[in-house]
Image: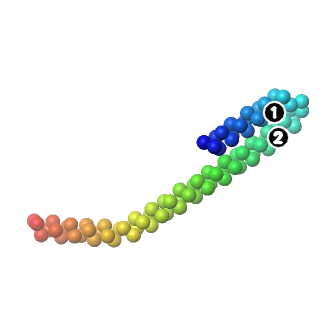
């Protein structure tokens, strides 16, 4: 949400700056620079988020692998019990 608000402020500033500028080419170059910085910052945040999600998935995968032997053992126990009951 904060990134969205920041991008909105940058866009508003660039638009107003361009409209009010006497030197339109200078205002355009400034807008390009702000836009480039903002997009780079956003890309960095997305990259950090993606890395965090991948790390979370790796942790969950590891936990599932540790639980697998117990699950297999319980499944075998249930199968043995079913055979005895039949």
Residue at image position (82%, 40%) is: 30
Q: SS of the residue at dot 2?
A: helix
The answer to which quarter of the image holds residue 13 is top right
Q: Earlier in the sequence, mark 2 or mark 1?
A: 1
47 shown above or below 64? above
Q: How many marks?
A: 2
- Looking at the rendered image, the quarter that the N terminus falls into is top right
Residue at image position (40%, 68%) is: 65
75 shown above or below 8? below
Is 43 situated left or right of 59 in this image?
right
Question: Which residue position holds label 1?
Answer: 17
25 shown above or below 42? above
Q: Which mark is residue 8?
A: none
Q: Farthest residue toward the right?
A: 23
The colour scheme is rainbow
15 shown above or below 59? above
- Looking at the rendered image, the quarter that the C terminus falls into is bottom left
Residue at image position (61%, 56%) is: 48
What's the CA distance linking mark 2 and mark 1?
A: 9 Å
The percent position of residue 21, horizontal first and vertical second, equals 86, 31
Q: Which numbered mark, 2 or 1, is in the foreground of this view?
A: 1
Asked if the residue under mark 1 is in contact with the one under mark 2, i.e. CB atoms within 8 Å, the reply is yes
Is 32 situated left or right of 58 in this image?
right
Is 38 situated left or right of 78 in this image?
right
Residue at image position (50%, 60%) is: 56
The answer to which quarter of the image holds residue 14 is top right
Q: Farthest residue toward the top?
A: 19
The percent position of residue 44, horizontal first and vertical second, equals 66, 53
Question: Which residue position holds label 2?
Answer: 30
Q: SS of the residue at dot 1?
A: helix
Binning the other alpha carbons within 10 Å of mark 1 as few (below 14), some (14 to 19) or many (20 upward) gives some
Binning the other alpha carbons within 10 Å of mark 2 as few (below 14), some (14 to 19) or many (20 upward) gives some
């Amino acid at each position: 949400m904060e990134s969205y608000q920041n991008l909105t402020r940058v866009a508003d500033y660039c638009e107003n700056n361009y409209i009010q500028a006497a030197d339109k080419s200078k205002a355009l170059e400034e807008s390009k620079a702000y836009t480039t910085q903002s997009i780079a910052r956003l890309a960095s945040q997305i990259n950090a988020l993606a890395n965090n999600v991948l790390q979370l998935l790796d942790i969950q995968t590891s936990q599932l692998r540790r639980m697998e032997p117990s699950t297999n053992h319980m499944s075998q126990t249930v199968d043995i019990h079913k055979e005895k009951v039949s």
